[in-house]
Image (tube, coloured by chain):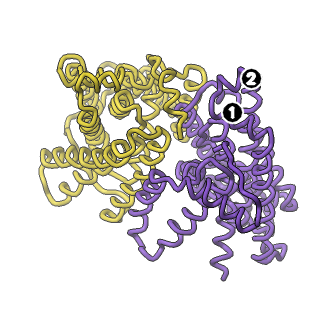
Amino acid sequence: MDFYIGLLQIFGIHTLLGLSAYLLILTGQVSMAQAGFFAIGAYMAGICTAMWGWHIVPALALGGLLSGVLALLIGFPALRVKGMMLVIATLAFSEVVRLFFFNFNYTVLRDGIPIGPIGAEGFRRIRYFPENGWTTIEVSLFMGLIVLLVGGALWWADRSRLGAVVRAVGEDELAAQSVGINLTTIKVAAMTLGGVIAGIGGGLYAHMTTHVEHLNFGILLATFAIAYPILGGMGSVFGTLAAVVFVQGFLVEGLRFLGDWRNLLFGLLIMLAMNVRIKQLGDVRLRNLLRGLFGLRRRSHAGA
Amino acid sequence: MVDFLQNIVDGVMVGSGYALLGLGFTLIFGVMRRLNLSYGPSVMVGIFVGTWFHLRGAGLLAVIAATLAGTVLANVYVDRLCFWAVRQRSAITAVVSSFVIWMQLEEAVILVFPDRTYPFPRLTALEPIELGPIFFRAEYVTMFACVALLLAGVWLLVYRTRFGLALRAVAQDPVAARYMGIPLDWIGLGVAVMAALIGGLAGLLIAGTDQLVIPKFGLWATYKGLIAMMLGGMGSIPGAVCGGLLLGVAEIQFVWYLGAQFRDLAAYFLLFTFLVLRPGGLLGQAIVRRELAAFRRI
C-alpha cells in the first residue's frame, strides 16, 4: 500500500513539474530551466523547514517565490532567444543552478548534527513530515490539494479569455501582437508563474525524499519536464497528467520487473510514445471520457 | 604574464578537442536542422568499443578502427531512429527523442562495462616540447595537428566535391535541393557518418590524452560540442572551430585564476551570455531566424 501512496506522491510532484513546462509551452517557449527552478525550490524549502524550523506552507511559498523571482530575471533575457536557442540557453541556466548547489555549503548544528546543504554530499535530513507526525496519507492529501489547486487554476485560466490570449501568443506572435497583446508581459508572466509552480513542486519533492543532491536536478529532469506536455498534447492540463501517469506509472515503475533491461527499453519507449503521440488520448478522447463521467455536455473546442 | 600565455596555449590545445565535437554538431545542424543530443553518447559508445578491443590485447590501429566504426554505427542508429523516422515532423520532438536515446546508449554501455573507469591506450609516447618558458604537451600538440589536418579535409570535402555541393544545397534549401534530384535521405546518412567520423576522432584524441574512459563521457562530450557550436554560431564550420578554441581558453583561464570548480560554471555562463547578447554566435548566419517556424512546432 505504501508503495502505491508513494507512487501517487511522485505523480503529484511530476505533474507540478510538467504543468510548469506546459504553461511555458502554451506561450511557445520550450524551457529546460524548469529543473533549475525545481532545484531552487527544493533547496530553499528544505532550508526553511530543516534549518530554520518553519512550517511547511510558508517554506513552500518562499521556495516558490524565490524560483519565481529568478524566473522573472531569466524571463527578460530569454525573450531575446527563441525555439532551439531558448532550449539551450535555459539548459545552461539549469546546469549553472545545479553546479551552484554542487559547490554550496551552509550548515547549522541541530541536536549536535550538522544539517544543511553540503556540496556534493547533498542536503540530508529534511524530515519535516516525520518529525511533525504527518502520516503518508496526510502528506499525500496535502500534495494532492496543491496539485489540484495549481492544476485547477491553470485549467480554469485556460478556459477564460486569458487562456485564449496565451494560446494566441504561442500560435503566432506576430498576429497576437497586431491585435494588441503585450508579448513581453505574457511571456515573462508565464515564465515567472512556471518558475513558481516548479519551485513549489521542488519543495514538495525535497520533503518527500528527505534528501536532495545536485545530481537529482540534471538534464534528465529537465527533459522529463518538457516531455510530459509534449507527450500529453497541449490541449489541456489533463494531457500532462495522463503523460505523467504513463511515464512514471507504466514506463518507470511498471517495467521494473525487466531489471537492467528496463533502462534500455525506457528511452526507446518514450521516443516511440512521443512520435506515435498519444495526443488524442490527452486532448479529445480523455476529455470526452471525463466529460461523460461527470455528465457534462460536449462541445467542440478549437483551442487545440 | 607567462602564466596567462601558457593558459592560452593549453586552452587552444584543449579547445581543439572541443572544436572537433562542435564541428560534428554544426555539420548535423547545418544540413539536417536538427540538434543531435545523442552525438556525444555515440562517441562514447565508439571509444568503449575501442576499449573492448584494447582490453583483449588488440594493437593501436585495431583500436582506432574499432573506435571509429563503433561511433559511426551508434550515430547512424541515432540518426535513423530520431531524424530519419521523424524528419518531416517537428524539431523539438526530434531533439527530445535524440536525448532519450542518450539514456539507452549509456545504459547499454554500463551493462557491458559495469566498472567505473576503463583504460584507453596512449596514442603518442613523445616527450613534452619546451619553447622558452612555455610547455607543450605532446598529446595536445598531436591533437592540435590532427584537428588542423581534419579541418583542411572537411573544407575540401564540403567546398571541392560533388557530395559537398549537394550538402551545401540541402543546407541552403532542402526543398529546392530535392527538386534538383538530390536524395535527401542519403545526404542525411552521409552527414551522420561524416559527423561520426569526426566525433570518433575527437573521442580517440581526448580518451588517448586522459588514458581512461567513463560512461559519463557521452554527456560531457555533448555539452562541450554543443557549447562550442553555439558560441561560434549554429551551422557555421569556422564558427564551431573558433567557438571550441574560445571555450578551451576560457575554461583554462577560469581554472587557473579562480579554481577548478569554476570550469563548467564558466562554460555555461559564457554560453548563456552569448545566447542572450549575440544569439547568432560569433560567426553565425541568419539560419536561426529563417528556421524559427520549424522550431516552434512541437
Q: Residue at the location (76% across, 66% down)?
A: A295
Q: Is residue A257 left or right of residue A66?
A: left
Between A286 and B112, the one nearer to me in the picture: A286
Q: Which residue is mark 1?
A: A168
Q: Which residue is mark 2?
A: A179
Residue A234, image x, y percentages: 62, 47
Residue B248, image x, y percentages: 43, 29
Q: Is residue B117 left or right of residue A255?
A: left
Q: In whole angstroms, how far apart are the C-alphas of marks 2 and 1? A: 10 Å
Q: What is the chain letter for disc 2?
A: A
Question: Mark 2: which secondary structure?
Answer: loop
Of the chain colours in the picture, the one used for chain B is yellow
Between B35 and B116, the one nearer to me in the picture: B35
Between A150 and A304, the one nearer to me in the picture: A304
Of the chain colours in the picture, the one used for chain A is purple
Question: Which amino acid is tagged 1?
Answer: Ala
Question: Which amino acid is tagged 2?
Answer: Val
